[in-house]
Image: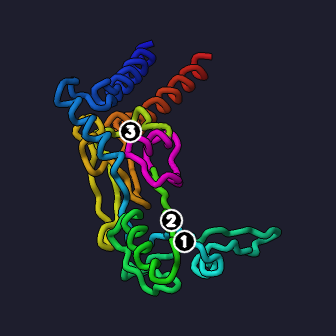
């Protein structure tokens, strides 16, 4: 009987030490007021103007339309569908796009190398339109990302790789796609891994503070990786299980031996 009481006590301690408070899982905890309202307003304004910048390794979908169909076809040739043979079936790959090389250039027919590194799609669109006016009548240029995707890993409901068709996504929207953080996800130190100047940079984000609403890290770039660490509650829970499990097993063995002895 005393052994059973000890086991219940150990189980109680295990769950008590792994409890997670509301303060650990609540987003944007600062009290609302004039400052908060101002931050939200500024954030919304910047979202409307925000555009991701282009870097080496990106793939751009550049489409040109003009009054010359023959020339349009020449420039837009890289976007013709291509058949790819695969085991037991044929796949169709469409709009492969223009790859941004290591020097930050794309090869555009009639124009040659075009520097795009560090520019936004709208800036490239304006630049190409001006350059193509020398060869085409009333050209219209469309520039979009073909490879805008983000990766979400760690303590979220649905980790994975998510494409972003509208080329604009915030950190909170990305976490929403992944089903939000689990109760064990560390909200005060979310990692954002981003390639900058050929090197991976790691940023730490505190989702429990309203300051994130006014941070440039709120807006994601293509190929960003979000990693959610497990919090102390999950670590303590796992640690306690590994510490208590041998005790529980030993107790069961002792009870089994006593039962067989007294039988």
Report the disc number at residue 64: 1
The span from disc 2 to disc 3 (Cα, nearest Å) is 40 Å
Q: Is residue 29 left or right of residue 258?
A: left
Question: Judging from the image, what secondary structure is the residue with disc 1 in?
Answer: strand
Question: Judging from the image, what secondary structure is the residue with disc 2 in?
Answer: strand
Percent coordinates x, y for residue 181 in the rendering: 42, 38
- Residue at the location (34% across, 30% down)? 25
Mark 3 or 1, nearer chain start: 1
Instruction: Report the residue marked by disc 2.
Output: 142
Mark 2 or 3, nearer chain start: 2
Judge depth for marks 2 and 3 and give the one in front. 2
Percent coordinates x, y for residue 226 in the rendering: 39, 51
Q: Is residue 261 above or below residue 178?
A: above
The span shown in magenta is: 153-178
Dots 2 and 1: beta carbons under 8 Å? yes
The span from disc 2 to disc 1 (Cα, nearest Å) is 6 Å
The span from disc 3 to disc 1 (Cα, nearest Å) is 46 Å
Check the image and name the residue furthest to the right. 88
Report the disc number at residue 185: 3
Q: Is residue 138 above or below residue 47?
A: below
């Amino acid at each position: 009987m005393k052994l059973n009481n000890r086991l219940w006590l150990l189980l109680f301690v295990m769950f008590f030490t792994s409890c997670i408070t509301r303060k650990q899982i609540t987003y944007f905890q600062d009290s609302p007021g004039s400052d908060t309202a101002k931050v939200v307003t500024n954030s919304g304004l910047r979202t409307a103007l925000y555009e991701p910048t282009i870097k080496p390794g990106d793939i751009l979908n550049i489409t040109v339309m003009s009054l010359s169909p023959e020339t349009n076809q020449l420039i837009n040739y890289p976007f013709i569908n291509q058949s790819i043979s695969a085991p037991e079936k044929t796949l169709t790959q469409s709009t492969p796009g223009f790859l941004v090389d290591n020097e930050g250039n794309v090869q555009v027919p009639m124009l040659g190398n075009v520097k795009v590194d560090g520019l936004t799609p709208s800036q490239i669109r304006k630049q190409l339109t001006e350059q193509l006016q020398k060869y085409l009548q009333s050209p219209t240029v469309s520039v979009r990302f073909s490879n805008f995707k983000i990766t979400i890993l760690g303590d979220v409901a649905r980790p994975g790789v998510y494409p972003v068709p509208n080329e604009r996504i915030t950190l909170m929207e990305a976490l929403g796609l992944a089903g939000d953080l689990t109760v064990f996800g560390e909200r005060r130190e979310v990692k954002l891994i981003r390639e900058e100047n050929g090197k991976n940079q790691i940023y730490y984000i505190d989702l429990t503070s309203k300051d994130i609403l006014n941070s440039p890290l709120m807006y994601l770039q293509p190929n960003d990786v979000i990693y959610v660490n497990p919090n102390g509650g999950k670590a303590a829970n796992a640690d306690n299980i590994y510490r208590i499990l041998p005790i529980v097993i030993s107790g069961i063995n002792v009870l089994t031996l006593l039962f067989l002895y007294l039988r």
